[in-house]
Amino acid sequence: MAVAVDRALLETQYAFDGVADSYDAANTANPLLREMRRQALAMLAACVTRGSHVLDLGCGPGTDLEAIGRLGCTVTAIDWSPAMIEQARQRVRAARLEPAVEVRHLGIQQLDRLAPSAFDVAYSNFGPLNCVPDLRATATMIADRLRPGGVLVASVIGRVCPWEIGCYALRGNWRRLRIRFARDLVAVPLEGQTVWMRYETPGRFAAAFTHAGFRRRSLRALGLFAPPPYLQAFSERHRTLVAGLQWLDARLGACPGLRAWGDHFLIVLEKT
C-alpha cells in the first residue's frame, strides 16, 4: 500500500508540474471557476479578522494569495508541486506581498513539519484535500496546526454532480459516470498525465474531521444547478441560461438535501 500511495503522490505532483505555467490563466478565463472562487474567498473573508494567520493548503500558482493578503492576513501557503510553488512565489514577489505571505514547497501529507497551534484559519480551494492519501490523518494534522476555535474553509470536489451524471448517462458512458462514486483514490487525466484523487461526500468528509475534533459550521453546494467548470464552452454559448442557474445555486445551494450535491461543496469546520 505504501508503494501505491507514493506512486500516486508522485504522479499527481508531476501532473500539476506539467500544467503550472498555464494553470492560472486557464482558471481565470473560466467564468464557472471564477464564480466558485468568489464564493470560497467570500466565505474565507467571513471567517478571518485582520492579523489572522491563514494556512493555504494546496495554493497552486497562488491565485488566491493576493485576495487573502488584502484581508490583512498573514499567510503560509504550501503546495506539493514545485512548479506551482515557483509560480506562486513569482506572484507574491510581483504583488509585493512579502513577508506577510510565505510560500513553502510542502505537501499536505507533510503538515507535521509545520509548528503546532500556529494558525487561526486553514483554507483549501478547488480540491487539494481530495488528493490526500489519508483524510483522517490529514484532518488530525490540520487540527494540530490550528489554535483552539480555528476553522477550516474548504472547497472540495463532490461525489454527486447532477450535470455529470446526466451528461455521461445520455452518452451511455457508464464507466466514466461511475468514477466519482469510487471509494478509493482513482486516476483522473490532466493534460496527458494522471492526478490521483478521491471524490468526497460532505458526510464522509465531515466525519473525518469530527474524529479530529471539529464540528461543522456551514455547508453549501457549488455547481449544483450550474454546469461543472469543464463545460466552459457550453457556459460561454449559453451565458444567460448559466447566469440563471448560478442565481439558483446562490439561493438554494445551502438548502438541506441539495447542499450535499454539486460539482464541489464549500464547507466550514470549526475546531472545538
Image: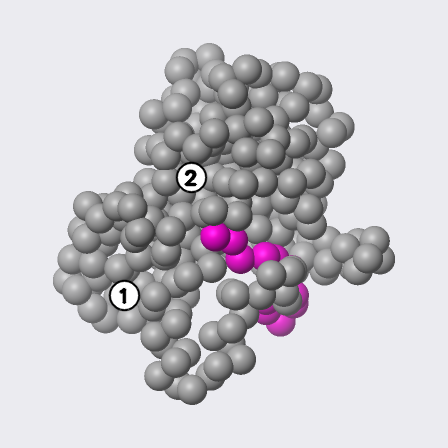
Q: Is residue 200 magenta?
A: yes
Q: Quadrant of residue 141?
A: top right
- Tell me what residue is drawn at x 40 percent, y 58 percent: 263
- Tell me what residue is drawn at x 39 percent, y 63 percent: 161
Few, some or many C-alpha atoms within 10 Å of disc 1 (few <14, some 14-19, many ≥20)? many
Q: Residue 71: image x %, image y %?
A: 39, 22
Few, some or many C-alpha atoms within 10 Å of disc 2 (few <14, some 14-19, many ≥20)? many
> Which mark, residue 235?
1
> Which mark, residue 146?
none
- 92 on left or right of 244: right
Residue 104, compared with residue 262, is above or below; it is above
Q: Please name the amino acid that badge 1 sits on.
A: Ser
Viewer can see residue 63: no
Q: Answer with mark 1 or mark 2, whichever residue precedes in sequence.
A: 1
Residue 222, compared with residue 75, is above or below; it is below
In this rendered view, identify the residue nearer to me: 246 or 23: 246
- Tell me what residue is drawn at x 61 percent, y 31 percent: 212
Classify the position of the N terminus by image quarter.
bottom right
Q: Please name the amino acid that badge 2 sits on.
A: Ile
Residue 195, compared with residue 73, is above or below; it is below
- 44 on left or right of 118: left
- 169 on left or right of 240: right
Q: Tell me where the magenta segment starts and ends, as one range.
A: 188-201
Residue assigned mark 2? 267
Q: Is residue 168 magenta?
A: no
In this rendered view, identify the residue nearer to me: 42 or 103: 42
